Amino acid sequence: MSNVRVLFVCLGNICRSPMAEAVFRSKLQQAGLDGIVEVDSAGTGDWHIGHPPHEGTRKQLDLKGISYAGMKARQFIGQDNDQFDYIVCMDTKNEKDVRELIDGAVSGADKGRGAEVLTFMSLLPEKGIVDVPDPYYTGNFDYVYELVDEGCDRLLEQVRSALKGSN
């Protein structure tokens, strides 16, 4: 595994997954891995394609000095399974939708190959919650940022281990 590619997925790709993309990208830069690990985000829905992150997400990222420059929402497609090593879903409904889209795009001998699909909160089992709450509905962007920040630290550890194991 020379380069690692990570895709964060939520419903509309304007709140949780772009927040995770920006935070993870920032952590990769700090760790000197930004040329080795690529990161992107997508949504399972198509309502916000081409839109920048939600104002609440932008405010949280601005408070922390984290760039989201150039980020625009896009929709997840089954072929993303071939392009990424990790597909990190922000909730269990997103995970179900992602797995269905992958199953529809992958056939025969390719079944079971591709990205590792996981839920974001599986990185933080001690929190005792299975889904990252959607701040589009709750308005609780600061709490979501706390979860994303901590979970991205754990994901960074996992990616570092994968990189070490591939050398």
Image (cartoon, grey):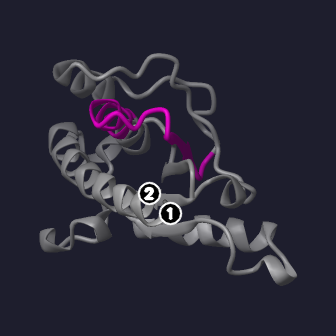
**Position in image of residue 85 (x %, y %):** 56, 59
Mark 2 nearby-residue class (10 Å; few <14, some 14–19, many ≥20): some
Answer whether labels 1 and 2 touch (C-beta < 8 Å): yes
**x and y percentages locating residue 82 in the rendered image:** 71, 59
Where 115 falls versus 145 (above or below)? below
Check the picture and name the quadrant holding the N terminus: bottom right
Q: Is residue 26 magenta?
A: yes
Q: Which residue is mark 2?
A: 163
**Left or right: 70, with 62 as reference point:** right
Disc 1: which residue: 166
Q: Secondary structure at mark 2?
A: helix
Image: magenta residue range? 22-45
Residue 110: which numbered mark, if any? none
Q: Residue drawn at (22%, 46%), measured in percent from left and top?
A: 144
Amino acid type at circle 1 is: Ser
- Mark-to-mark CA distance, 1 and 2: 5 Å
